[in-house]
Amino acid sequence: MSKNIRVLIVDDSAVVRQTLESILSAASGIEVIGTAADPYVAAERMKKEVPDVITLDLEMPRMDGLTFLQKLMKQHPIPVVICSSVAERGTANALKALEYGAVEIITKPKVGTKQFLEESSIRLVDKIRAAAMTHPKKITVSEPSMKVRPKLGADAVIPMGRPQALTTTEKICLVGASTGGTEALRIFLEALPLGCPPVAIVQHMPEHFTAAFANRLNSICQITVKEAVDGDAMVRGQALIAPGDKHMLLKRSGARYCVEVKSGPLVSRHRPSVDVLFRSGARYGGGNVVAAIMTGMGDDGAKGMKELSEAGAYTIAQDEASCVVFGMPQEAIKTGGVNKVMHLNKIAGEIVRACG
């Protein structure tokens, strides 16, 4: 049997179908088994061969993507990556799709610079691989064969340096997550009390979607949740979520903490990157930091968590049983930079306890 990740592309735009197929076909270990202009065509195609992953548009004729997703999850659950527009309705529906069981979001490809196309290809292939990891079957794939720029570390955004001398004892919380993280963060943030320590979060999510995600969490949590803006203060009872396509760094202004939001290259194949946030936490927070790394594919955050641990931070990794994908926590554990491994449901309580 083929070990390739078999992908079915469902989108009413012929240009989008062609672009996605071209990118995925260039990646080793991925096979596009077909394309469909709407869910009815997709359903007929799936009678012949069941894909491992589906990329799904949300706004299509005859049947919209949300309806198809609901039917799919009830009858034959398959990992789904949403391919969405960045319009207001598109972002709202994409977040609903995550609630209905989709595992990742990508933005629809568009014409841009060579760098934009390279980064879009990297993100698309990584999302497909991450989605495949949520499938019950274990799938072994090799690295993409297409030529991409070297995988950069946090040095590309924030150079390695000694931790700065602390002038405050205020505790802060840093969190990183990826695949499965939208649900994990909901559970985590809903469990935090009003007076919780300041929280800064990197969730791998496309540009424009993080604001809607933060607003959704803000409506259901006791604490305030917002998309971070450059210069935002870290205050108790508030969580800041890094904007999609921007790095977020912890900074200190006198005895108070704030965040810096900036552009930069992909770090550990991501922007925002958990490694960038964690390294800045090691430099400016040190022993005042309590950090958690949650569900997600890859190793973003592993090196940063090791640096945090060496700077005196208290570090937590989500356990395998409660992860959608155990990749990021597992890689962090391998570095020796994790103090405690625990179930998702216990992380909020442990952070509050550790922050006193």
Image: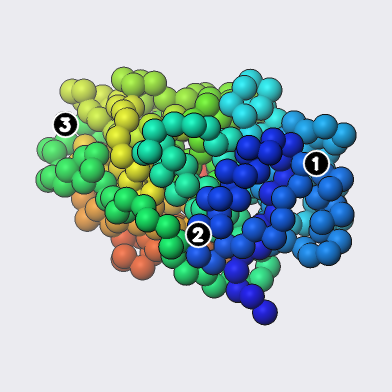
Kind of residue at badge 3: Thr
User: Where is mark 1, residue-wise?
Assistant: 38
Q: Nearer the viewer, mark 3 or mark 1?
A: 1
**Label 1 to label 2, Cα distance in Å?**
25 Å
Residue 290 drawn at (x, y percent): 36, 45
Image position of 341 with respect to 222: above or below: below
Pick whichever of labels 3 and 1 is earlier in the sequence: 1
Q: Dot 2 surroundings within 10 Å: few (below 14), some, or many (20 or more)?
A: some
Q: 98 or 31, which lies in front? A: 31
User: Where is mark 2, residue-wise?
Assistant: 27
Q: Nearer the viewer, mark 2 or mark 3?
A: 2
Residue 92, numbered label: none
Mark 1 residue element:
loop
Quadrant for the N terminus in the image: bottom right
Q: Is residue 112 left or right of residue 282?
A: right
Residue at the spot x=53%, y=50% of the render?
Answer: 23
Residue 42 drawn at (x, y percent): 81, 50
Mark 2 residue element:
loop
Is residue 319 at least partly visible in the picture?
A: no
Pick whichever of labels 1 and 2 is earlier in the sequence: 2
User: Where is mark 3, residue-wise?
Assistant: 167
> Which picture quadrant has residue 62?
top right
Residue at the spot x=69%, y=35% of the render?
Answer: 13
**Label 2 to label 3, Cα distance in Å?**
49 Å
